Amino acid sequence: MQEFVEFTLGGIASGMVYAAIALSLVLIWRGTRILNFAQGGLAMLTTYLASIVISRTGSYWEGFAAGLAAGLVLGAVAERTVIRPVESKGPMNAVIVTIGLLIFIEGLAGIIFGGQYRSFPPAFSIVGLRIGSFSLGISRNDVFTAGAVLAAAVILAVVFRYTPVGLRLRAAAFGPQVARLLGVRVGRVLTLGWALAGLFGALAGVLVTPSTFLYPNSMDAIFVLGFTAAVIGGLDSPVGAVVGGLILGVVLEYVGGYLGSDIVPLFGLAALVLVLMVRPSGLFSAATTRQV
Amino acid sequence: MSAGTALAVEGIEAGYGGAVVLHGVTVAVPAGTITAVLGANGAGKTTLLRTVSGMVRPRAGRIVAGGADVTGRRPEQISRAGVAHVPEGQGVIAELTVEENLRLGGLNRRHAERAAGLADAYARFPVLERRRGLPAGTLSGGERQVLVIARALMSRPRVLLLDEPSLGLAPRVVAQVMGLVRSLREESGLSVLLVEQNARSALSIADTGIVLNLGRVVAAAPAADLAADVSLRRHYLGF
Ligand SMILES: Nc1ncnc2c1ncn2[C@@H]1O[C@H](COP(=O)(O)OP(=O)(O)OP(=O)(O)O)[C@@H](O)[C@H]1O
Ligand SMILES: [Mg+2]
C-alpha cells in the first residue's frame, strides 16, 4: 500500500513534466502539422539561461522567470527565422529543419557551456513528504512541479476557450483558410503558438533539470517521453497531452518500482511503438476529416 | 471607377501555377446591388471570388474595394477592407461551436460592437441561437449556410462574396437563402457578388449579371435581360 501510494504520486509528478513537453508539441502540431524536434533543445537552452540568472542574482525565482520568458521569445524567434522560410514547402521540410535546429542548438551549447554536468537547484525542498510515519514518496518540490504545470495548463485552457486570442488560435488550427478570410492574421497566430510552446518547454526544463542535471543533451530523454505522452493523447488535443503525460508517468513509475528501474527507458520506447501501432491517432484525437 | 461602385474588378488575369484560368475578367458591383456570376462548371467563377478575396494572386489587372486598391493584398487584409468571402462548400469550422464561429466573424470589430453584432445575428437567425453551444459540424446543410452568411455579416462587410450558397440545398431552402440575400441588400445596402450554378434563382434576385465561359466574360447585362435571352440561356445558363 505504502509503495503503491509512493509510486502513484511520484508518477503524477513526473507525468506532469511529460505533459508540459507534450503540450508544447501539441501547440505546434495542431496549428502547423509540424513536429518540433528542437523543443527539448530549446528547453535546454532556456534552462542554461535560468541557471546563469540564478547564479548571478542568487534568486531562484528570477531565474525561473527568465527561463520562461526566454522560452516565449525563443519559440517565436525559431518560428520566424527558421520555420517560416520553409513553411510553404510542406510540414516534412519543416520537421527536418527542426531536427537540424536541435543538432545546432546542442552543438552550440556544447561550445558555449562545455559538456560537463551542472546541477540545477529545485524550487523547494526535495525531502520526501510524510504523513505521520507514512511516506508519500514525493517532495514539496514534486508538488510544486505538478502544480506549476497544472496551473499553466489550466490557464492555457481558459485562454483557448474564453478569449479572442484563444479563438484565433483554435480557428487558425482548425481552419486556417477560413480564418484568413475572416481577417485572422494566421501568420502571427502561428508565431504565438510557437511562443506558447516555447514557454511550456521552458517550464518543463526548469522543473525536470534538478533531477537530471544540466548538459547539452539533458532534455533528450525527457523529450522522447513527452513525445510519447503527446502521441498517447493524440497529438491534437491539449487535454489528451496532459492525460497522456499522467498515464505515462504513473505507468513508468510502476514499471520502475515493481519491475526494476533498468527497463524504464525500454518500456517508454515500447509504449511509444505500441501506441503508434495500435492507435496512431491517440486516445483523445477527434480524428475528423476536413474540407474547405 | 465611379463613386457608387462597391467593387471593381478590372482586367483580371489569374490562375494556379502555370495554368491561367481568368483571362482579363472585368466586373463592377454598384453599391447596394447584387451582381450574379454565372457559368458552367470550370468557367472560373470560384477563381474569380478567390482572386477578389486574395486567396489567389492576380497576374494582371486591378481590384478596388470600397474605394481602396486591394490588388495583391493578403486575404486577412482584404477582409479588413470590408470584403467578406463565403467560400464554396461553406467553410464552417466544424470543431468550433456555432457561437464561436459567429464570434470569429466579428473579431476585428470593437468590443461593444461585437456583442451587438451577435445579438443582431441571433435576432435575425433564431435557429443559430438555439444551436449556439453545439459544434458547428452538427448543423444541417441549410443551417450551415445560414451560419456562414451570418458569420460573414458579423464583420459588417461592404461587399459580400457568395460562392454557390444554394449548393446541396433543398429547393425550399434555396429559396430561403436567396430571400435572405435579397433582404440583406434591401435592408442594409449590402453589395453582393453572387456566384451560382443555379442561374434561375440567382437572376431572380440579382440586379445585374455576368456570364463566364472558360475564364472570359461572354455577357454582362441587367439580370432581367440575361434571364430573357433565350440563346444565352440555352448555351450557357441551362434553363
Ligand atoms: N486549386 C486549383 N489548382 C489548379 N487548378 C484549379 C484549382 N482550382 C480550380 N482549378 C481549375 O481552374 C478552372 C476554374 O475552376 P473554378 O473552380 O474557378 O470553376 P468554377 O466556375 O467555380 O466551377 P464550379 O461551378 O464547378 O464550382 C478549372 O479548370 C479548374 O480545374
Ligand atoms: Mg466553383
Image (cartoon, coloured by chain):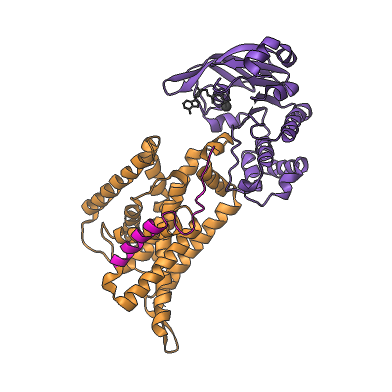
Chain colours: A orange, B purple
Q: Left or right: where does residue B82 sit relative to residue A11?
A: right
Q: Quadrant of the N terminus of chain A?
A: bottom left
Image vertical order of residue A242 relative to residue B149, above or below: below
Q: Nearer the viewer, residue A289 or A160?
A: A289
Tell me, yes or no, whether the highlighted magenta stretch contains residue B109: no
Image vertical order of residue B60 relative to residue A182, above or below: above
Whether residue A65 can be seen here: no
**Span colored in magenta:** A265-292
Res. B119 image quadrant: top right
Q: Position of residue B115 (x, y in %)?
A: 71, 45
Q: Left or right: where does residue A111 sit relative to residue B108?
A: left
Tell me, yes or no, whether the highlighted magenta stretch contains residue A288: yes
Residue sitting at x 42%, y 57%:
A279
Q: Position of residue B235 (x, y in %)?
A: 63, 13
Image vertical order of residue A39 relative to residue A15, above or below: above
Res. B2 image quadrant: top right
Image vertical order of residue A108 relative to residue A5, above or below: above
Q: Position of residue B159 (x, y in %)?
A: 66, 26
Residue sitting at x 59%, y 20%:
B40
Q: Position of residue B50 (x, y in %)?
A: 55, 27
Q: Residue furthest bottom?
A: A133
Residue sitting at x 59%, y 36%:
A182
Q: Left or right: where does residue A115 sit relative to residue B169?
A: left
Whether residue A246 can be seen here: yes
Q: Nearer the viewer, residue B25 or B76?
A: B25
